[in-house]
Amino acid sequence: MNFLSDTTAPAHPRLIEALAEANTGYRPSYGADDISARVEARLKEVFETDLKLVFAVSGTASNALALSVLCPAHGAILCHDEAHIHRDERGAPEFFTGGGKLIPLQGAHAKIELDDLDRVLGEIPEGFVHTSPVRVLSLSNLTESGTAYSPNEVAERADRVKDRPAFVHMDGARFANALVSLGCSAADLTWKAGVDALCFGATKNAAMGAEAVILFPSAMDRFEELQIRQKRSGHMAPKMRYLAAQFDAWLQDDLWLTLAGTANTRARALAEGLGAVDGIEILHSVDGNEVFARIADPIAEAMRTAGVQFYQWPDGSARFVASWCTQEAEISKAIEAAQ
Amino acid sequence: MNFLSDTTAPAHPRLIEALAEANTGYRPSYGADDISARVEARLKEVFETDLKLVFAVSGTASNALALSVLCPAHGAILCHDEAHIHRDERGAPEFFTGGGKLIPLQGAHAKIELDDLDRVLGEIPEGFVHTSPVRVLSLSNLTESGTAYSPNEVAERADRVKDRPAFVHMDGARFANALVSLGCSAADLTWKAGVDALCFGATKNAAMGAEAVILFPSAMDRFEELQIRQKRSGHMAPKMRYLAAQFDAWLQDDLWLTLAGTANTRARALAEGLGAVDGIEILHSVDGNEVFARIADPIAEAMRTAGVQFYQWPDGSARFVASWCTQEAEISKAIEAAQ
Amino acid sequence: MNFLSDTTAPAHPRLIEALAEANTGYRPSYGADDISARVEARLKEVFETDLKLVFAVSGTASNALALSVLCPAHGAILCHDEAHIHRDERGAPEFFTGGGKLIPLQGAHAKIELDDLDRVLGEIPEGFVHTSPVRVLSLSNLTESGTAYSPNEVAERADRVKDRPAFVHMDGARFANALVSLGCSAADLTWKAGVDALCFGATKNAAMGAEAVILFPSAMDRFEELQIRQKRSGHMAPKMRYLAAQFDAWLQDDLWLTLAGTANTRARALAEGLGAVDGIEILHSVDGNEVFARIADPIAEAMRTAGVQFYQWPDGSARFVASWCTQEAEISKAIEAAQ
Amino acid sequence: MNFLSDTTAPAHPRLIEALAEANTGYRPSYGADDISARVEARLKEVFETDLKLVFAVSGTASNALALSVLCPAHGAILCHDEAHIHRDERGAPEFFTGGGKLIPLQGAHAKIELDDLDRVLGEIPEGFVHTSPVRVLSLSNLTESGTAYSPNEVAERADRVKDRPAFVHMDGARFANALVSLGCSAADLTWKAGVDALCFGATKNAAMGAEAVILFPSAMDRFEELQIRQKRSGHMAPKMRYLAAQFDAWLQDDLWLTLAGTANTRARALAEGLGAVDGIEILHSVDGNEVFARIADPIAEAMRTAGVQFYQWPDGSARFVASWCTQEAEISKAIEAAQ
């Protein structure tokens, strides 16, 4: 029963088949192939807008690339104190931006509170040569606590920075999980709410290794720079067709939404089961495929002994991640082990 | 009555004379001159230890150079949320370190609280490839609120990080003011308390423009790297004798301590006078030459009308800085204007 | 008849099968999986030595990562003027090293001449703070002209820099082609000849997208730094098993050598055929899978009309690249078209 | 008899007096003072055009700052192989640009040959994502061989890159010496010939340490970025009045031209005298205050014994630099020592 991370799960077999199908004949390198073009066209339908994109092989690369075209080296990026870009990327955003500054904000359940956002914005002037100005607001959706910002919550935060001028970046490593949970459209959760660039992750939701940095029309003038930086950082894979093929299969027939839905369902079942156990407290709303719980030591020990694998979060709580291939039986057994 | 900043004050005449005296004959470039050597020898006496140093022309340069040899690009620097290196240097530390991460800590009166230091250290693991490890703790002394860390307070904080491994950096833009106020030795306040590198500022205390980055024995193996970075960042002035000459005159006969003492005395007098006024609250202990006050609007207006110049701090309070040349009469008039 | 680049070719079917086989069950992320371990063990056999490695998805990433742990930001990298790292990576080495300096050397057939190497080494002092010292010598094998350095030629150049101190880096995007052509051992062509780090490319030789940065014992102390930079640059793929699986299948039963041999055979046949045509001059020794030719305009036109695709090199010559899947019939047709 | 470098000479006494005069009362920090404004106005007269500028304390800083606002991190800078920015700044341009690429060109007497410029421009395409495009052409005037580009020579080179788009940067560490020697106007030698940014050096011509980065109208839209980078690199001196005061005195009554004229006269006299000696060959036209000579070993030895100090150039030749304070008697004695 592996709940360590959705990155320990295999890819969906359909994606491997797609690689085999793409593996025929010569195709142009570096993204000029027909499969890449098909994915771009499909994403325009999914997001109901024009857009530009590049592929990458990790969420860290995707986030750092996006931020590097949105924030100058002498600018600042606002993010939640627990954001992946701040805590878990070994300073990749600072590296790619050439020394940009991340400013961590507070808020329960890993959501940036409006009050803290207003406080920090009030402290950082525009046009003052000594101070790094705010150039990006970064929101994770799902957040690092597995909660989701609604379109309205995104818009409220985006509105605060739009006149700086600043861009809004969304770390969507688990965007599909948030989207399915919220039941809104992909457009509603992104550009219609003020998001300029989305890091759209497939890896954690059944891909082998495929992320897309998507620029919506408000940021599309940064596309040439994005391609240059993709090249310069070694992320312009020569045989791009294989990254595109994963997305192609993943988007077809809404496979991505189906798989995210399954993972979410499993996570919620786990949360319900665990939440009913004395000595276990579910810490955050389960808006996607992650469950955070504070578990009494003897129970945690019993679960581990029964083979339930989970990750210990820096604050001492337990994180369980369900994936597209988590089985109902695994959930039941994990709950049993806790009882 | 200019209390805007000690950087608006002129240099002490003795330093200009020293420039004239240094202005004779040919001397080796880039720091190989006799005056530079004399300053180094004198600083070893002042700090009662072996040390290495380079000069720089601004506190920002001095801090960024020091941090860049103490913290790798993939490391983190802990500092107070209000630290000059975080708020007022346009990301210079991030630039010089190649993308290092500054992590802001909390604490009243611009002093890092031990609890918050412990919390953050607890959240940042060592040896985890995904997370920027703590490599520097930076303390400002004077702090940005004009308060001073005592040797003991420095040591308590330094002890927390020594085994990471991490270095302790002190931003001493107003080190002389802190030292005079505390009445301890320069050694007690630095290397004996665990400080590995000191940015020793003269500019705000009557120099024309002269700072020294001092490496104490525990960090002296970084000296070659420091010289390289001084060169590479354009701070290895060809005619270094003129930077050295300023320090030379400044250190002679303890002029630096006398001047800092004067500024401190003026600031304390101002604080006492203003503190007695209804509608004015002195916000922090006046441990050096800075006074922070919350002033009722009509009083502030009256003071401005009377020609009292001061700086409005981001939190809305008023900052008054006394310098080596602030006159007693100016203090009296400023207080009168407030009454 | 596509001779544009070996990156336009598909992957070998065996590698896709390997992906499917790797696609079962949960596996640790970030390279801690069993397939990665198996590849490491196999590479130790291939190179007959201890070594450390990380995977990457492009040659640009692989080169830039390797160089960034071999050369400090203030150091210099010597390479041929036509080197991929200098001409075709959009400054990735400069980006990853934090501003390292590439110094281009001359030499016929894209091989660094000893005389020019000696000249440049003579001009660049050690221990002079104003000048970026030589810290890396980079050799491409195959070179950018499709020629190969023999083990002896590598050693002669490596010896020149060993005492600087400097490392020797080999860009082995087409290492297999060079190795098969030279008929020596992988050890002879690398660490035994003084190479400290090899960028070992599989992508151009039938992989989907897989490169390995290999550190030999003389550079293995840089491994932790290499992993940190792999993470920090977004190249630590979460589901690393799929990169490893490609290498695993590629190395099995010497598939990599067989495929390189085929490509080399095709290239030589093409060179022989074209070389016999009046109006075509073969410009460099065909030591691998690349043929460079100066072709009279009418012939080039006739070839294009017949569907022969090739790349026009910056100097106006024609580059033909054979791949693992180039057919004998394609060679014959291309030669016919030229006659 | 010190001919080592014009940076070993003292400052002109008039500049020290100017510092004393500037040392009165409070003045705004960071360049907002009246003396800075006066220098800006005076420079507009000198160059007969609108312009923007910032001060710096070293030629390395000045060059690196200028280049960093003219060239993106993914761009290339063309310069002569012997250029100071390539050989003598420890990679400062690479550091400040965030990893820009310097491409060294050939040409006798340290002047870029048009043929080599054309060759390199022909090899570097525009709009090709894999290759760093040419964004700056940098010319040193005086060159590193002490020769001068005439306005026409500057214009010929500038014209070659203007449509890339690319900027023309002039390293004018010894601009005054070139200007006096050529007898043209400052405007003719810069913006009228296609120069977009000039690093205008005073340090080597009798200042204590003062350089100006000047943006002419064609590059003035980079001024805000230049100020930001000046701050971020620690070169925005708090008490900027003292940098301004040096320029102020230096420009007054054409002192700068007079001093450069003296140095040039001394250098020419030295070249004439040495050139008449058997066993000494003057290597380059003496267009400023530098003399390069190949000197037979016994003669060189005799000169050193007589106390003549000079610098050995990397190519083995001898460099003599005259300064504003070099005496006629010193020239005579040096020549005598060689005879």
Image (cartoon, coloured by chain):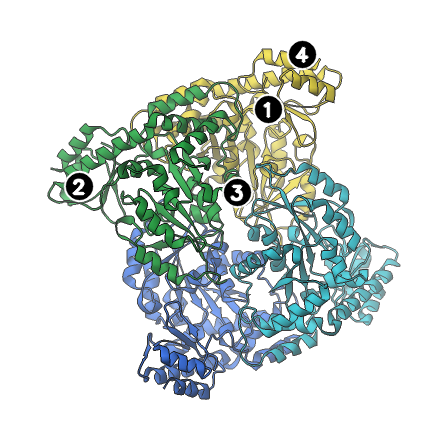
Chain colours: A blue, B green, C cyan, D yellow
Is disc 3 placed on a helix, strand or loop? helix
- How crowded pointer 1 is (Cα within 10 Å; few <14, some 14-19, many 20+) is rated as many
Along the line of sight, the residue nearer the viewer: D40 or D279 = D279
Is disc 4 placed on a helix, strand or loop? helix
Residue D64 position in % (x across, y down) = 52, 39
User: Real-space Cα distance between discs 4 and 1?
Assistant: 18 Å
Q: Which is in the foreground here, disc 2 or disc 4?
A: 4
Examine the image and state in which quarter residue C5 appears. Answer: bottom right
Chain of the residue that carries numbered disc 4 in the rendered image:
D
State if disc 2 and disc 1 touch (CB < 8 Å).
no
* Tag of residue B300: 2
Same subunit: marks 2 and 4: no
For the N terminus of chain C, which image quadrant?
A: bottom right
Pointer 3 residue: B225
Is residue A311 depicted above or below C198 in this figure?
Answer: below
Chain of the residue that carries numbered disc 3 in the rendered image:
B
State left or right for residue D162 relative to residue B156. right
Residue C175 position in % (x across, y down) = 73, 61
Along the line of sight, the residue nearer the viewer: C324 or A87 = A87
Along the line of sight, the residue nearer the viewer: D245 or B107 = B107
* Tag of residue D336: 4
Query: What amino acid type should be assigned to the residue bearing mark 3?
Result: Glu
For the C terminus of chain C, which image quadrant?
A: bottom right
State left or right for residue A293 relative to residue C157. left
Query: What amino acid type should be assigned to the residue bearing mark 1?
Result: Leu
Residue C193 position in % (x across, y down) = 74, 54
User: Real-space Cα distance between discs 2 and 4?
Assistant: 74 Å
* Tag of residue D4: 1
User: Real-space Cα distance between discs 1 and 2?
Assistant: 58 Å
State if disc 1 and disc 3 touch (CB < 8 Å).
no
